Image (tube, rainbow, N blue to C red):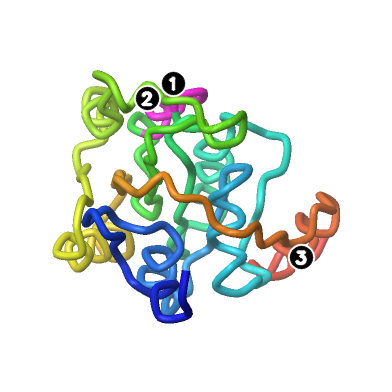
């Protein structure tokens, strides 16, 4: 891959590419970010580590519930959970809890590459009949959407950062793999850093 290709939003077949997509969405926003384990964490770290990022390690299925807790504790901040399709499906019941609590500051972005990326890129359930946005709507999250091309980016950005939550967007992305960008894996350090970033000292 050439240097120029690294920054193209879509691949040769027209599918969204995860790293340029994350950079386009998040580079100029100040939301608090909670990432699901694995590739979403590498994606967010690739655009710059920051104290307002809370990376989950070894907590598969808990990204949305962690984000919900942060949203309740920080009602004046926008909270965006970024997770993968496999991790979202593992914690699918969390969408019902989010819908019923209904935090207006919570947004969920699911990066759907139709693969189980952390266990060998096996074909995932969303490659078949499973529709995460439809599941979220059925759970009671009224504003959901699908992002399949660069043309969908402005609306997705508006929903994720400006529309009253809870909201959920599914970005249908290429299964290509990028070089891992590893932030700290020290859970205590990450938690304490995040607490300081949101103004919680003790």
Residue lying farthest left?
151
How many marks on residues? 3
Let me know if residue 34 is in the magenta part: no
Magenta residues: mostly which secondary structure?
helix
Q: Is residue 103 left or right of residue 167?
A: right
Kindly identify which residue carries mark 3.
193
Residue lying farthest front?
1
Mark 2 or mark 3: which comes first in sequence? 2
Kindly identify which residue carries mark 2.
96
Let me know if residue 91 is in the magenta part: yes
Which is more toward the observer, 136 or 130?
130
Determine the secondary structure under disc 1: loop
- Above/below status of 138 relative to 177: above
Q: Which disc is residue 93 wearing?
A: 1
Q: Position of residue 125 (x, y in %)?
A: 37, 21
Q: CA distance from mark 1 to mark 3?
A: 29 Å
Q: CA distance from mark 2 to mark 3?
A: 30 Å
Residue at horizontal 84%, vertical 59%? 189
Look at the image and tell me whether residue 5 can be seen: yes
Quadrant for the C terminus, please.
bottom right
């Amino acid at each position: 891959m050439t240097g120029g290709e690294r920054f193209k939003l879509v691949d040769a077949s027209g599918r969204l590419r995860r790293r340029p997509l994350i950079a386009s969405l998040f580079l100029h926003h100040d939301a608090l970010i909670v990432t699901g384990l694995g590739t979403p964490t590498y994606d967010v770290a690739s655009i710059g580590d920051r104290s307002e990022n809370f990376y989950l390690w070894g907590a598969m299925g808990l990204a949305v519930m962690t984000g919900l807790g942060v949203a309740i504790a920080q009602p004046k901040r926008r909270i965006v959970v970024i997770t993968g399709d496999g991790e979202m499906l593992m914690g699918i019941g969390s969408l019902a809890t989010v819908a019923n609590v209904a935090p207006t500051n919570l947004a969920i972005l699911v990066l759907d590459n139709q693969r189980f990326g952390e266990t060998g890129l096996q074909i995932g359930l969303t490659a078949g009949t499973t529709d995460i946005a439809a599941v979220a709507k059925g759970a009671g999250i009224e504003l959901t959407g699908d992002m399949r091309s660069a043309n969908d980016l402005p609306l997705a950005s508006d929903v994720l950062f400006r529309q009253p939550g809870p909201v959920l967007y599914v970005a249908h992305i290429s299964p290509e793999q990028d070089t891992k960008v590893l932030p700290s894996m020290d859970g205590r350090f990450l938690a304490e850093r995040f607490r300081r970033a949101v103004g919680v000292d003790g």
